[in-house]
Image: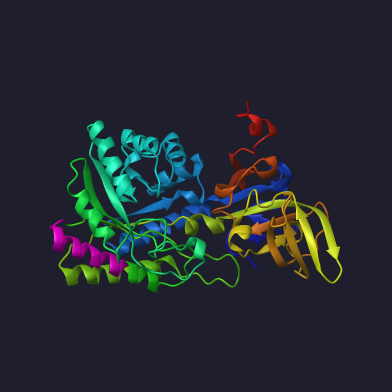
């Protein structure tokens, strides 16, 4: 019934998260409301950190992929849990720095970083800039030279692996906007050019094959392919790479149809493959980096809505309208993402009603789920959508001039606001 252990049904028959009654949360903070269990987030951080320490003998670092959910509170939490972070824009970098996150543990990604973003990264001393293409490499070398600095970089590589996931979230194949391909020689060309630049320090390689992957084999293959490339680099240039970032993409449980593999199993098998190739090629095992985002945050979060109209179209379908929608969760419109949904104030009742959950935007495609099994709702009920911690608030918009929701962290039966609800005044703040 629930995708996370932080969700239970309390004595009132209400859905509870982290010991907090979700109906009371909705009344206290209003809806739509995103609630995240802080203890679950921390447990996931520790599971990744402990497994990478064990499998790579402490020679690695877990980077929280903050595009999944970015705010000051999550960067402070990542700092407390001894993680690094992966940022993909100047805005995420700025937020992390404002939260006091150590710049040397920030890895800056992006396929089209602006000159201003690269300058911000250099000025603040981020740990690594993950270079996506040869144009960026040339620009970065020039900027670093102007500043009297040397940029520590990783190259983003497309290892030619097609992870079996939605086409919009595959990134490892040659036909991708991200990175340099192995198949056509551009990756090696980039390496050789980087080694000639005086203001560039090539530390290692990065790859990311996709997201929401429920199979270990593509990750094993990526590790083997990347170690093979490190071997080729050494053979052709004499340069030994010290770091290998294997990205993220670990699948999570959105519904009962998902069967995620324990993080420890991923780490065990991929580390075995990496170590075997290192031995075969006579290479040192590189410092390993991973970038879990969704798998740290997704199942820790839920979104609460208030039910408005219930429209029953005979012999067609039932529509349940909510006070949010694609403005706080565009994933169904984008990917047809599946969710488990329930009526929070009737969580102890059977799901005997089939409905399409409709948002309030003036857009036919503004749906959260179709043909969902839920408890029969009434106007004013609180609807809960599970596993919305990742890529919901971070992808939220103000379409139709709808304010973005508040976000609260819960722990041990207590809640605290970490992002305030936007007001109508906020929407007009930059208008002139």
Relative to 70, is 325 on the left or the right?
Answer: right
Q: Residue 382 location in percent, x, y? A: 75, 53
Relative to 371, is 174 on the left or the right?
Answer: left
Would residue 411 be seen by someone viewing this image from the given angle? no
Inspect the magenta stretch and tell me whether residue 236 lies in it. Answer: yes
Residue farthest along the left direction in this orientation = 238
Q: Residue 251 location in percent, x, y? A: 49, 65
Rendered image coloring scheme? rainbow
Q: Nearer the viewer, residue 146 or 68?
A: 146
Q: Residue 379 location in percent, x, y? A: 83, 54
Would residue 308 be seen by someone viewing this image from the given angle? yes
Residue farthest along the top direction in this orientation = 432
Q: Nearer the viewer, residue 214 or 333?
A: 333
Residue farthest along the right direction in this orientation = 314
Relative to 19, is 207 on the left or the right?
Answer: left
What kind of secondary structure does the magenta stretch mostly adopt?
A: helix
Residue found at x 50% / y 45%: 70
Q: Residue 22 location in percent, x, y? A: 69, 52
Residue found at x 17% / y 69%: 281
Inspect the magenta stretch and tell me whether residue 228 lies in it. Answer: yes
* Residues drawn in magenta: 223-239
Residue found at x 64% / y 32%: 426
Q: How many marks?
A: 0
Residue 30 lies, with reference to residue 219, above or below; the image says: above
Say which quadrant the N terminus sits in. bottom right
Residue 311 lies, with reference to residue 225, above or below; the image says: above
Residue found at x 45% / y 43%: 75
Say which quadrant the C terminus sits in. top right
Relative to 176, is 24 on the left or the right?
Answer: right
């Amino acid at each position: 019934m629930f995708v996370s252990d932080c969700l239970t049904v309390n004595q009132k028959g209400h859905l509870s998260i982290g010991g907090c009654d979700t109906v009371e949360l909705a009344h206290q903070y209003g809806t739509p409301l995103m609630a995240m269990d802080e203890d679950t987030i921390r447990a996931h951080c520790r599971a990744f950190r402990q497994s990478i320490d064990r499998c790579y003998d402490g020679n690695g670092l877990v980077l929280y992929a903050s595009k999944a959910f970015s705010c000051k509170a999550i960067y402070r939490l990542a700092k407390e849990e001894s993680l690094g972070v992966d940022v993909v824009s100047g805005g995420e970098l700025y937020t992390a720095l404002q939260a006091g996150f150590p710049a040397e543990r920030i890895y800056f990604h992006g396929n089209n970083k602006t000159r201003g973003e690269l300058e911000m990264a250099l000025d603040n001393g981020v740990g690594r800039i993950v270079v996506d293409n040869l144009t960026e490499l040339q620009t970065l070398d020039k900027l670093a030279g102007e500043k009297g600095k040397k940029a520590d970089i990783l190259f983003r590589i497309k290892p030619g692996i097609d992870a079996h996931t939605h086409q919009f979230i595959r990134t490892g194949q040659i036909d991708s906007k991200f990175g340099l391909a192995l198949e056509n020689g551009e990756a090696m060309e980039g390496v050789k050019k980087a080694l000639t630049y005086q203001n560039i320090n090539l530390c290692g390689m990065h790859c990311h094959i996709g997201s929401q992957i429920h199979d270990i084999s593509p990750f094993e293959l990526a590790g083997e392919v990347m170690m093979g490339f490190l071997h080729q680099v050494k053979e052709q240039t004499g340069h030994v790479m010290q770091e290998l970032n294997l990205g993220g993409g670990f699948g999570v449980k959105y519904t009962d149809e998902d069967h995620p593999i324990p993080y420890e199993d991923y780490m065990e098998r991929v580390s075995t493959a990496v170590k075997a190739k290192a031995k075969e090629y006579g290479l040192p095992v590189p410092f390993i980096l991973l970038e879990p985002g969704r798998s740290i945050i997704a199942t820790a979060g839920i979104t609460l809505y208030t039910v408005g109209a219930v429209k029953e179209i005979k012999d067609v379908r039932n529509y349940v309208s909510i006070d949010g929608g694609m403005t706080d969760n565009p994933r169904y419109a984008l990917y047809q993402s599946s969710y488990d949904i329930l009526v929070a104030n009737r969580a102890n009742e059977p799901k005997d009603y089939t409905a399409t959950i409709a948002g309030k935007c003036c857009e036919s495609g503004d749906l959260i789920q179709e043909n969902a099994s839920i408890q029969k709702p009434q106007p004013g009920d609180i609807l809960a959508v599970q596993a919305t911690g990742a890529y919901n608030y971070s992808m939220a918009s103000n379409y139709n001039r709808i304010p973005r929701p508040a976000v609260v962290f819960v722990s041990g039966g207590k809640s605290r606001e970490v992002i305030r609800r936007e007001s109508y005044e906020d929407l007009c703040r930059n208008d002139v």
